[in-house]
Image (cartoon, helix red, strand yellow):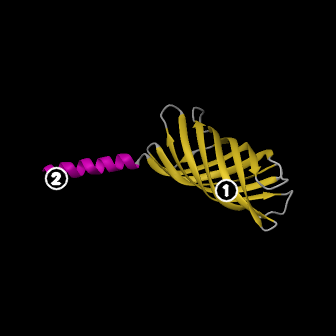
Amino acid sequence: MRTSKLAVALITALLSVQSFAGVLIEPYAGYGTIVTTTDVPSDENETEAGAFAGARLGYSFLLLSAGVDFNAGSAGDYDRTNTSAFVGVDLPILLRFYGKYIVSSDLENSDDNFDYDFKSGYVFGIGFTGLPFVSLNLEAGQQKYEVEVGGTDYDIDAASVLASISLPLNF
C-alpha cells in the first residue's frame, strides 16, 4: 500500500513539473553599438552603431532556460555574427537575467582587409517582462579577436551594448 502511494505521488510530481517545461523560441531585434579597442599601430579606436537581429532557441524549465542564441547585424563599418550558448533565469518580479558564452563570432570591417580571428567572448543581459507577450532587453558583452598585420599578431577588444525587444514563446 505504501509503495503504491509513493508511486502515485512520484507520477503526480513528475507530471506537474513537466507542465512547466517546454521549448523556448525567442526572436528579437534591436539597436546596438560596438566599441573596438586595438593595439595595432596607427589604428584608432572606433565606436559604431547599428541594427541587430537574432533568436534564442532552447528549453525552459520552471524559472530556468538554456539553449543557443544566434544574432547578426551591422554597426557602421562592422558586420558581426555571433553564435552563443545561453542560460537564463526568469524571476517572478517581471525581470529576467541571462548570460551568453560566445562559441563563435565573425567580425568584418569594410574599411580594411584584415582577417579577424575570434578568441573569446561573453554577454550578460537583463530583461523586463512586464509587458504582454514581449520582453525589453539590455545586454552588454565583450569579445576578443586577433588580427595579423604585417606578420605581427595584434589583439582587438570589441565591447558591445544592445537594446532589444523580443517575443519569448514557450511551447
Give the residues drawn in magenta, as a range.
1-18
**Magenta residue check for 58:** no
> Element at badge 1?
strand
Residue assigned mark 1:
82
Residue 116 visible in the displayed image: no
First reached walking from the N terminus: tag 1 or tag 2: 2
Residue 113 lies, in percent from the top left, at 84, 63
Q: Are marks 1 and 2 in contact (CB under 8 Å)?
A: no
Residue 65 lies, in percent from the top left, at 50, 48
> Element at badge 2?
helix
**Magenta residue check for 15:** yes
- Distance from label 1 to label 2 (Cα)? 51 Å
Horizontal placement of 1 versus 64: left or right?
left
Disc 1: CA contacts within 10 A as few (<14), some (14-19) or many (>=20): some
Residue 34 lies, in percent from the top left, at 74, 47
Residue assigned mark 2:
3
Which mark lies nearer to you, 1 or 2? 1
Instruction: Return the residue nearer the eye: 69 or 79.
Output: 79
Instruction: Return the residue nearer the eye: 104 or 71.
Output: 104
Q: Quadrant of residue 47?
A: top right
Magenta stretch, overall SS: helix
Q: Quadrant of residue 102?
A: bottom right
Query: Label 1 amino acid?
Result: Asn
Query: Label 2 amino acid?
Result: Thr
Residue 169 lies, in percent from the top left, at 57, 46
Q: Residue at x 79, y 53 (%)?
A: 78
Disc 2: CA contacts within 10 A as few (<14), some (14-19) or many (>=20): few
Instruction: Return the residue nearer the eye: 117 or 170.
Output: 117
Q: Residue at x 57, y 32 (%)?
A: 130
